[in-house]
Amino acid sequence: MLKCFEIFVPIVRGDLILLEKLSYDFVKQQASQNIIYTEVRYSPHFLAINGGLSMSELVDADSVIDAVTRGLRQGEIDFNIKVNQIICCLAWRPEWADDVVRIARERRDRFPCAVVGIDIAAGEEHFDQDNYPHLNRPHVQAFKIAQELNLNICMHAGEVGDSSNIRHAVEIYGATRIGHGYRILSDSSLINEMKENNIHFETCPTSSVETGGWNYNETNQKDWKRHPCVDMIQNNMLVGFNSDDPSVFDTSLTWQLRIALGKMNLSIETIIKSLDDSINASFICNNDKDLLRKRLNDYCSTVRLPTEIFNKISD
């Protein structure tokens, strides 16, 4: 899956005008799905390396974020939705970790479209201090500083790696949200720990198939009712639905909810609860959360979904 980035990232890397336009288009696409709040996640350093109009001209991570922020802010104005940013460390680039924390600290209050949290993406090897100490130590040290600064932290963990990565993400790195986390189902005690600590899990049905996060039984074909997020919900965990990277996986949040309703056979009530759980776990102030809950409750109280909509969802 990561090889996809090798194809299209060189096209946009360092092109600040294009990055601003793509950020604006992203907000437009979110608005087209009736999404009212988004925390968009990306690595500014990955988009800056060898950037510039020529190979000799450097475009740094701050310049990338400036361009993205301009696009997001204009999109907010034009499409009347709210967007904030989460910036990512990359597991295999530990030299970027300290700078990610620095950027998040400096831009945490630069609303609209502030940097509201940090993450580590692109693999779970950084959890393995025995085999990958050169990846582990710099990230652990950077996230220790992030915790001291009270930065919001989420973490890819337990997608294809061991379930212990989830515990490390929470106890060592300070994560309050876990990306994917499907391997938790192999450890019932860990499930209880995460529930006690109100840890939220960001599940992504489509990407879980492509990345191997969900290793479904071929003899049963792709029976979505056996997807791990169904078991996570049945275990009363805090679970939300997410699109992961919509361009790479050719999907959308709308499609993820179609899968949840039509293929996993989850109820409307379950989906509404997942939306409410996602609001609770979001990296915004309580006043903004209250406004989102009001819009969700107003929608639920006024909209009646006819039978034909459910039939279309099931197709």
Image (tube, rainbow, N blue to C red):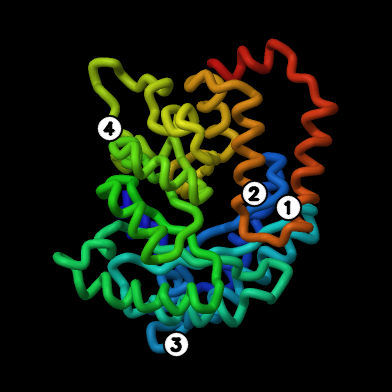
Q: Residue furthest bottom?
A: 56
Residue drawn at (34%, 41%) of the image? 189
Label 4 with label 1: CB-CB less than 8 Å? no
Marks 3/1: CA–CA distance: 42 Å
Q: Name the residue under label 2.
A: 280
What residue lies at 38% left-to-right and 83% top-to-bottom? 55
- Secondary structure beneath label 2: helix
- The residue indicated by pointer 3 is 57
Q: What element carries label 3?
A: loop
Query: Label 2: few (<14), some or many (≥20) within 10 Å?
Result: some
Q: What residue type is labelled 2?
A: Asn
Tell which circle, 2 or 3, labels the residue nearer the N-terminal end.
3
Which circle, 4 or 2, is nearer the viewer?
A: 2
- Foreground mark, 2 or 3, reads 2
Mark-to-mark CA distance, 4 and 2: 30 Å
Q: Which of marks 1 and 2 is nearer the N terminus?
A: 2
Disc nearer the start of the sequence (4/1) = 4
User: For mark 1, what is the residue?
Assistant: 289
The amino acid type of the residue labelled 4 equals Asn
Q: In the drawing, what numbered circle is on residue 215?
A: 4
